[in-house]
Amino acid sequence: GAVQPLLAVEDLRAWYGHSHILQGLSLEVRPGEIVTLVGRNGAGKTTTLKAIMGLVAKREGRVTFAGADILHRPPHERFHRGLAYVPEERRIVPGLTVEENLRLGILAAKGAAKGAGRGARVTRRDEARRIEVIAETFPRLKQRLKQEAITMSGGEQQMLAIARALMAEPVMVLLDEPSEGIMPILVEEMFAQFVAMKRAGTTILLVEQNVELALDVSDRVYIVDGGAVVYHAPAAALRDDPEIQARYCAV
Ligand code: ATP
């Protein structure tokens, strides 16, 4: 039978002032999938993630996460339900070490547990265990736990932003252009980590310009153009379709 989607977006419309950006966009992500949104600059990919997270003031349509309609709920409620978001700008906290930045992810989780919570209080032992797990997953961060986060390279900071989101043990993560401005060797490492995250049970919705790499790790792909989905397919199908790639994915 059909698997229930974890995230279902139906006929999503969004506006910035009078500019109508999302024009009825629909997609779904099933539990355990990596799904990628690709498309030209200005197609509406970032706006899609922001609207899902409730960060675009004017939005209409339906967004269901784990069975609950969340589109018009306040942004923090998504976090309580296990939906995390790593925006393109990394928001590393200057003056704090890598480890302290990671602990901020836990603080957020503690705050969430107090609210509509996924229940469990995060104990100190839990906190130490999560840092250990993250350090094993991100060896580059493990070597730098005591380093001031802002002194790391852009790619390392991006990994920290992703790792910090994982500290709250989210069910699903939305990642906006994680490879932006990062040197290729680190990008490959990062994408390998996405596969590891998937294996550990985290569902991922990715926005990515690096189509080739994205296709390698993704289960399915949506092409966004003019604020709507113009094509969707298993990643392998798009990989074998240079014509579609050339038409919609050129930067
Ligand atoms: P990119 O890869 O360039 O980020 P994208 O597909 O993510 O492309 P969006 O950032 O979603 O595209 O932008 C979609 C459209 O919305 C663009 O035309 C952009 O200029 C416009 N837009 C984005 N943010 C705002 C804003 N805060 N106010 C007004 N218009 C905006």
Image (cartoon, rainbow, N blue to C red):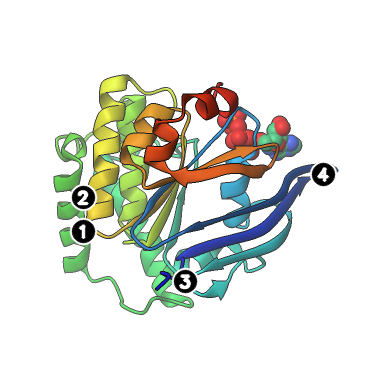
Q: Is residue 83 left or right of residue 193?
A: right
Q: Is residue 208 above or below residue 130?
A: above
Q: Are marks 2 and 3 in contact (CB under 8 Å)?
A: no
Mark 4 and mark 1: Cα distance apart in space:
41 Å
Q: Amino acid at mark 1?
A: Arg
Please say whether residue 54 is visible from this viewpoint.
yes
Disc marking residue 17: 4
Q: Secondary structure at mark 1?
A: helix
Relative image position of residue 10 (x, y in whole percent):
64, 61
Q: Secondary structure at mark 3?
A: loop
Residue at 54% of width from left, 64% of height from top? 76
Mark 2 and mark 3: Cα distance apart in space:
25 Å
Within the displayed image, which quadrant is ligand 1 positioned in?
A: top right
Q: Amino acid at mark 4?
A: Gly
Relative image position of residue 148 (x, y in whole percent):
28, 34
The residue singled out by tag 2 in the image is 134
Quadrant of the image containing the N terminus: bottom left
Disc marking residue 66: 3
Disc marking residue 249: none
